Image: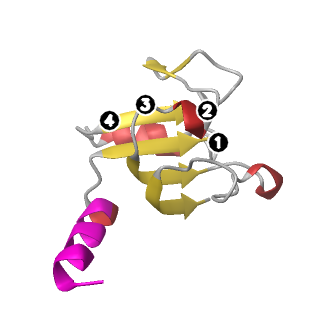
Amino acid sequence: MGSDQNAVTLRALLSPTSIAIVGASEDETSLSGRPLQILFQHRYCGRVYPVNPRHDTIGGLRAYSTIGEVPEPVDLAVVAVRAALVPDRKSTRLNSSHANIS
């Protein structure tokens, strides 16, 4: 990987333009609800994709049933679900170069 590619990869991790939150929750006090609340609190300007099959919307945003339904590749995926539910990158279109497993 060349230095230009390293810079692009690092930029996507540290300053993502799109974020998927797998396991997103409306409960701002839960581990799975905090990422969205923090993004709103800090006025994140990029695109946010909550992923949770039990909700149509979360925090006023459309919620997606699976990461595969997210309409674009994301720069960062925050995975906030129990270990048994963590997507397998080989069998699921995770669409992200970077994942933060909570």
Lower sequence index among marks 4 and 1 = 1
- Label 1: few (<14), some (14–19) or many (≥20) C-alpha neighbours in 10 Å: few
Label 2, label 1: how many angstroms apart (C-alpha)? 8 Å
Which residue is labeled 1 in the image?
30
- Vertical placement of residue 73 versus 51, above or below: below
- Tell me the SS state at disc 1: loop
Q: Is residue 1 left or right of residue 28?
A: left
- Pointer 2 local density, CA inside 10 Å: few below 14, some 14–19, many at least 20: many
Instruction: Give the mark toward the camera: 2 or 1.
Output: 2
Looking at the rendered structure, the kind of residue marked 1 is Ser
Residue beneath disc 4: 47
Nearer to us: label 2 or label 4 = 4
Q: Can residue 64 be seen in this view?
A: yes
Instruction: Return the disc, 2 or 4, that comes first in the chain's sequence.
Output: 2
Number of other residues with Cα within 10 Å of mark 4, as a class: few under 14, some 14 to 19, many 20 or more: few
Q: In which quarter of the image is residue 47?
A: top left
Confirm whether the magenta stretch covers residue 60. no
Mark 2 vs mark 3: give the one in front.
3
Dominant secondary structure (helix, strand or loop) of the stretch shown in magenta: helix
Measured Cα–Cα span from mark 1 to mark 3: 26 Å
Decide: few, some or many residues near mark 3? Use Cα within 10 Å; few <14, some 14-19, many ≥20.
few
Secondary structure found at label 2: loop
Mark 3 and mark 4: Cα distance apart in space: 11 Å
The figure's colour scheme reads secondary structure
